[in-house]
Image: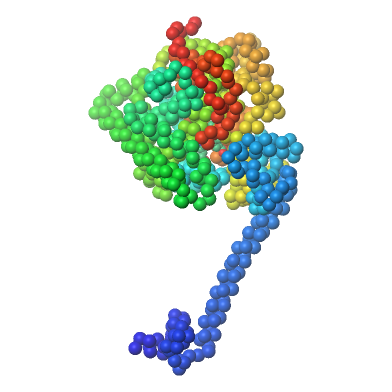
């Protein structure tokens, strides 16, 4: 009955189609059939097919136009000729490619100038810049990051808003984080007191009961402890799973780039599932410490309410630095929102915290190991820093509080170590949507991989003088010359050995960012938001550490470490064996 009705009254498009089908299968007779209807259907299908074809053609045409523009603009940028269809891709793929690429870029810059292009294939262009002014302009204008970094973080920690390629997506979170890190938390970094160093040293000795310690493991542990205490407050030191957390972070760091290098996550590999399991465990532990931190904060909050008068007293004491209770970053609203996933709803709860622990621990461990290595190789500089600490202690009214801003030698040593060994050999950016027009008149097409060979730029003679590749903290110091009432500053430009005898106590540290070629924390739109915190935290740790211990190289150890990529960052390897010798007397 239903069949008859539909055959007779095909009043809709669906009816026509259904009817055609029926005709085709012979179940409906030709009585209601009209060539007009089948014509109509055929035309509609034709029109749709044309629309589809036009759409696909315009998409392809768009791609071809983009490709032609890429070739046209790319060929205007100087650089070596393309050796094959895969171009110079081999230089950046493969296990130990970092060194090859840096050497190749160094030679190419010498030959072609401050901006060099490499073809990584017919559709992929890489542009490297080594002139500080050009670099600064590029780092401001190119706001996006390469997808690999974003994929690395996402694969390990879920969806984040930090470290993602698109600047648009990262911007809001960056701003609020920068406010937190450079505000209250920076003040708290001053409170990394002797107590924290004691706790770090205690843990180091319990983990490594030997007298001789491996510089890399010690540094990793120090970085983890400072960052943990800064982010999670004092609750972190009472946390029994801290050691497991540290181990997990390092295990994840070891394989992070390998798994992220697959464009499709390799579900078929058992190693990948093991990696995912480690990441899940890390997430659970992060939630535990966040919860612990929350409870500790609540407890202190209640205590404050119950003892109102007492609170005023505690407040004063904390301000003076006598009591160093700290709730860490989690005491602030920002991370509580993060825990609840309210801030940016699509973010994985605690994802950004894990991302920061990962990036912060690795980079800070690299810098601490680097500083320790320089100190054991330059005992004269270590002595100067120690004298500076003693002087600061004598002048300070509060023995607990440290003012690292006055530690000129120490800060200069930190900057010089960061200059000689950046976290990675390259800073990388890209402009995902727009072409990049540089002041030199060169247009870098959208989607191009932009790199700064920061490892080369930071030891470039033309930016840093003839001793650019040597360790010389004096380059960040200016000598204060007393002439009557005024005290003008004279930048120190000579080699370390000439300046070492130039007298003490009259140096001031310069702003390292005054030199545009100082880029260990990047620059511009995606500059590191943890820069000030990392420098303050590391300097405060070294103040307490060097006050109590002298760091020495193990006698008889051969030492010629070279910059090598390890656990996602550049490190000086082989790592030196060091000894901490407790100081018995305060030096006059
Ligand atoms: C010695 C320690 C550190 C070094 C050497 C370092 C280095 C860097 C570098 C090179 C970048 C990329 C900059 C660019 O592309 O211009 C970066 C980005 C960043 N760093 Fe650090 N960093 C350190 C510590 C920290 C710490 C302790 C934190 C936070 C607690 C932190 C948070 C970030 C964030 C959030 C970004 C930006 C991510 C983005 O915009 O996507 N860093 N860092």
| Residue lying at 70% horizontally and 27% vertically, measured from the top left | 461
Position in image of residue 312 (x %, y %): 31, 24
Count of number-bearing discs: 0
Q: Is residue 99 above or below residue 2?
A: above
Residue closest to the eye, 441 or 448: 448
Q: Is residue 472 above or below residue 390?
A: below
| Residue lying at 46% horizontally and 87% vertically, measured from the top left | 23
The N terminus is located in which quarter?
bottom left
Position in image of residue 209 (x %, y %): 40, 20
Residue closest to the eye, 329 or 50: 50
496 lies left or right of 352: right
| Residue lying at 74% horizontally and 48% vertically, measured from the top left | 76
Q: Is residue 576 visible?
A: yes
Tell which residue pokes out farthest to the right in this image. Answer: 111
516 lies left or right of 542: right
Residue closest to the eye, 524 or 386: 386
Position in image of residue 203 (x %, y %): 39, 23
573 lies left or right of 86: left
Q: Quadrant of residue 59?
A: bottom right
Residue closest to the eye, 357 or 103: 103
Tell which residue pokes out farthest to the top in this image. Answer: 588
Tell which residue pokes out farthest to the bottom in this image. Answer: 31
Q: Is residue 408 visible?
A: no
Q: Quadrant of residue 440?
A: top right
Image color mode: rainbow
Position in image of residue 351 (x %, y %): 42, 42
């Amino acid at each position: 009955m239903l069949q008859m009705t539909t055959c007779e009254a095909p009043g809709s498009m669906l009816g026509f189609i259904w009817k055609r089908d029926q005709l085709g299968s012979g179940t409906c007779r030709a009585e209601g059939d009209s060539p007009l209807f089948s014509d109509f259907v055929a035309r509609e299908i034709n029109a749709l097919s044309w629309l589809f074809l036009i759409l696909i053609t315009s998409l392809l045409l768009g791609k071809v136009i983009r490709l032609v523009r890429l070739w046209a603009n790319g060929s205007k940028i100087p650089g070596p000729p393309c050796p094959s269809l895969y171009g110079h891709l081999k230089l950046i793929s493969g296990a130990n490619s970092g060194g090859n690429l840096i050497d190749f870029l160094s030679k190419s810059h010498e030959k072609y100038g401050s901006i060099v292009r490499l073809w990584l294939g017919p559709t992929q262009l890489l542009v490297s810049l080594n002139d500080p002014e050009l670099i600064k302009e590029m780092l401001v204008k190119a706001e996006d990051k390469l997808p690999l970094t974003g994929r690395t973080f996402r694969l390990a920690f879920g969806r984040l808003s930090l470290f993602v390629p698109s600047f648009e997506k990262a911007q809001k979170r960056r701003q609020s984080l920068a406010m937190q890190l450079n505000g209250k938390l920076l003040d708290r970094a001053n409170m990394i007191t002797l107590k924290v160093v004691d706790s770090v040293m205690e843990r180091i000795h319990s983990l490594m009961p030997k007298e001789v310690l491996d510089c890399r493991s010690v540094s990793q542990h120090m970085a983890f402890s400072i960052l943990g205490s800064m982010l999670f407050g004092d609750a972190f030191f009472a946390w029994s799973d801290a050691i497991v957390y540290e181990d997990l972070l390092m295990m994840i760091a070891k394989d992070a780039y390998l798994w992220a290098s697959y464009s499709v996550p390799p579900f078929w590999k058992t190693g990948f599932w093991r990696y995912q399991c480690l990441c899940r465990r890390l997430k659970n532990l992060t939630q535990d410490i966040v919860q612990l931190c929350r409870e500790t904060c609540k407890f202190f909050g209640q205590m404050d309410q119950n003892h109102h008068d007492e609170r005023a007293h505690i407040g004063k004491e904390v301000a003076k630095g006598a009591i160093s209770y700290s709730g860490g970053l989690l005491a602030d609203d920002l991370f509580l929102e993060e825990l609840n996933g309210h801030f940016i709803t699509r973010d994985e709860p605690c994802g950004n915290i894990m991302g920061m622990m990962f990036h912060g621990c690795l980079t800070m461990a690299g810098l601490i190991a680097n500083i320790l290595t320089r100190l054991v190789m330059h005992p004269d500089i270590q002595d100067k820093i120690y004298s500076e600490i003693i002087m600061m202690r004598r002048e300070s009214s509060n023995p607990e509080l440290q003012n690292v801003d006055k530690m000129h030698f120490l800060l200069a040593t930190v900057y010089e170590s960061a200059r000689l060994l950046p976290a990675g050999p390259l800073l990388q950016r890209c402009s995902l949507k727009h072409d990049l027009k540089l002041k030199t008149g060169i247009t870098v097409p959208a989607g191009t991989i932009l790199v700064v060979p920061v490892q080369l730029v930071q030891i470039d003679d033309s930016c840093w003088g003839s001793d650019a590749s040597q360790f010389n903290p004096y380059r960040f110091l200016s000598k204060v010359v007393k002439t009557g009432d005024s005290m003008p500053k004279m930048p120190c430009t000579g080699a370390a050995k000439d300046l070492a005898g130039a007298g003490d106590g009259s140096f001031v540290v310069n702003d390292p960012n005054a030199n545009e070629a100082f880029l260990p924390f990047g620059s511009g739109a995606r500059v590191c938001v943890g820069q000030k915190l990392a420098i303050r935290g590391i300097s405060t740790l070294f103040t307490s550490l060097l006050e109590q211990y002298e760091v020495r190289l193990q006698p008889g150890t051969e030492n010629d470490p070279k910059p090598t990529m390890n656990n996602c960052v550049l490190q000086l390897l082989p790592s030196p064996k060091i000894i901490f010798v407790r100081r018995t007397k305060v030096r006059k």
